[in-house]
Image (tube, rainbow, N blue to C red):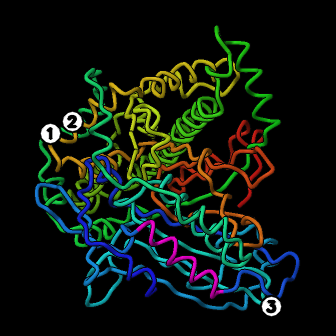
């Protein structure tokens, strides 16, 4: 740690409006490493700890603190005399790695206290009141059978690209330290990362493209609650949102889509498309189409079930009304009034929506041509779109999936530099607007967010004994969220982590198409 502190230079990093879009969320992941060779020197704590602080020298932003600047803007202050050091904890567990593997790494088998942060970004209880910009927990398992590394970084400072870049760098430093490879140590120390948020503005084009109506409506308009949330400090805002229980009543399941099943489905769907080339029918397009239909149909079946339950209740109420009516003739008007009141409260009908509110997350690095700049700040571009349910609610067949692909593909393809520029203009014109999507999420229970993380380097970290056997986030994130993840190498399968309200998930688990396409992991 002292080695790191001696290298710190004071600086203030003004966060970009793109940084605030998911600022209320954390990025928490668990990395499960197996000591398959029963090595006595398996991932020693000293080397892991030392390499962490070496990696931190190249990510000093993780030792800064958040400073609100007013009007929805925030900076990260890195002060060598007032560092906000990451939480770094080491512990041991009586849980054996074999137990985790036998349970397919389900969270019920995890060591107690493994996870040090939840979905919402806020400070841990205590007098300091500062949000840590990194939380680390290194757990050594029973009989040195493995190590679990939990790491959380708030979305304020990095996105998935920055998060996994740090973990990969951490592993490189550890591998170099343990192997005594000076060349590798030099290479790792010379890797440069960009934290300068101005890189976004410097690469915005002159051209602009109209934003979708849904995006404009989400980020504009009168919303006193959103403005109040934007006015709060990051920590207070986090505590308020945590009490809102975004994760309340949710169920998460993780599924595997085999490469064989995905390629077979692609071939079937391609027969109903004018252009079924690889560019027009990527894994991302195909899975987004499948999932948007799957969830739309799950909501449809949930509503039908609720309607059926109401119908049964209505019949029972009708019978009760007849009996009570007869009794009312004897005991008076009061009973009739009670019966009428019950009938009115049960007959309220809900207006069905004609569209699915779909949010497909993309990366501005591609649109702006800065993939090679090693930019570690947030590059999330949310595509908010309204997709017609008369297309999505139809039975899932190759033909109907081809229609769904035609819906989602243009959403992704539209994310060029001109659209990014228009979105940045929208955010910059009203920095407080970053809280509006939170309100939108709260009042749109059928919103679906799909994030494609298949290109992230989940399994690139090697601390000297090989890559992790399994990588996953926390079990309860936020509702209506689907993450598409890579499978552990050498497999090219796709892992789908789905988080939904319990009644909706119940319908997903019964869907025959989904059951045939995937294998449930847990």
**Crowd band around label 1 with a 10 angstrom C-alpha radius: few (<14), some (14–19), many (20+):** few
Residue 124 magenta-drawn? no
State how far apart marks 1 and 3 are (Cα). Answer: 57 Å
Q: Which residue is mark 1?
A: 429
Residue 493 marker? none
x%, y% of residue 12? Answer: 23, 64
Mark 1 or mark 3, earlier in chain: 3
Q: Which residue is mark 3?
A: 143
Q: Which residue is mark 2?
A: 426
Instruction: Tell me how far mark 2 sits from mark 3, CA to CA.
Output: 55 Å
**Decide: marks 2, 3 in contact (CB < 8 A)?**
no
Q: Which residues are magenta?
A: 45-59
Locate residue 466 relative to residue 158 in the image: left or right: right
Overall secondary structure of the magenta stretch?
A: helix
In the image, what residue occupies the spot 40% across and 44% down? Answer: 380
In this rendering, the answer to whether 347 lies above or below 68 is above
Location of residue 170 by image quarter: bottom right
Q: In x, y percent, where is residue 405?
A: 58, 23
Residue drawn at x 32%, y 78% as measured from the top left? 123
The answer to which image quadrant residue 85 occupies is bottom left
Q: Residue 191, image x and y in percent?
A: 52, 58
């Amino acid at each position: 740690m002292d080695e790191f502190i001696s290298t710190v230079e004071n600086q203030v990093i003004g966060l970009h409006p793109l940084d605030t879009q998911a600022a209320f969320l954390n990025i928490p992941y668990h990395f499960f490493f197996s000591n398959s060779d029963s090595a006595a020197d398996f991932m020693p704590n000293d080397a892991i700890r030392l390499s962490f602080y070496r990696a931190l020298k190249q990510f000093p932003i993780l030792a800064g603190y958040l400073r609100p600047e007013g009007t929805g803007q925030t900076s990260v202050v890195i002060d060598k005399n007032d560092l906000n050091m990451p939480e770094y904890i080491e512990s041991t567990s009586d849980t054996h790695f074999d137990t985790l593997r036998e349970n397919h790494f389900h969270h019920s088998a995890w060591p107690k206290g493994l996870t040090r942060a939840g979905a919402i970004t806020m400070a841990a209880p205590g007098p300091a009141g500062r949000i840590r910009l990194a939380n680390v927990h290194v757990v050594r398992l029973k009989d040195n059978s493995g190590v679990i590394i939990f790491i959380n970084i708030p979305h304020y400072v990095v996105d998935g690209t920055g998060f996994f870049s740090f973990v990969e760098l951490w592993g490189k430093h550890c591998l170099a330290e343990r192997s005594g490879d000076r060349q590798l140590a030099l290479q790792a120390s010379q890797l440069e990362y960009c934290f300068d948020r101005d890189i976004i503005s410097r690469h915005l084009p002159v051209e602009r493209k109209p934003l979708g109506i849904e995006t404009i409506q989400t980020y504009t308009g009168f919303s006193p609650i959103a403005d109040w949330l934007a006015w709060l400090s990051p920590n207070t805002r986090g505590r308020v949102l945590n009490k809102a229980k975004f994760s309340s009543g949710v169920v998460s399941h993780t599924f595997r889509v085999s490469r064989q099943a995905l390629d077979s489905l692609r071939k079937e769907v391609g027969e109903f498309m004018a252009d079924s080339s690889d560019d027009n029918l990527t894994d991302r397009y195909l899975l987004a189409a499948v999932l948007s239909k799957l969830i739309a149909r799950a909501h449809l079946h949930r509503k039908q079930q609720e309607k059926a339950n109401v119908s049964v209740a209505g019949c029972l109420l009708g019978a009760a009304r007849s009996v009570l009516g007869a009794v009312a003739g004897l005991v008076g008007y009061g009973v009739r009034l009670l019966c009428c009141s019950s009938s009115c409260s049960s007959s309220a009908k809900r207006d069905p929506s004609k569209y699915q509110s779909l949010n497909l997350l993309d990366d501005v690095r591609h649109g702006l041509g800065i993939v090679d700049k090693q930019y570690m700040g947030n590059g999330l571009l949310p595509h908010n779109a309204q997709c017609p349910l008369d297309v999505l609610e139809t039975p899932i067949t190759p033909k109907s999936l081809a229609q769904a692909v035609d819906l989602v593909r243009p959403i992704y393809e539209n994310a060029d530099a001109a659209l990014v520029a228009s979105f940045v203009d929208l955010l910059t014109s009203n920095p407080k607007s970053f809280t509006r999507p939170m309100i939108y999420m709260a009042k749109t229970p059928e919103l679906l967010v799909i994030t494609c993380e298949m290109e992230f380097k989940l399994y690139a970290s090697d601390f000297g004994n090989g890559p992790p056997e399994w990588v996953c986030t926390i079990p309860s994130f936020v509702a209506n969220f689907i993450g598409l993840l890579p499978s552990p190498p050498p497999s090219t399968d796709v892992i789908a982590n789905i988080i939904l309200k319990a009644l909706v998930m119940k319908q997903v688990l019964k869907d025959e198409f989904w059951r045939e396409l995937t294998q449930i992991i847990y």
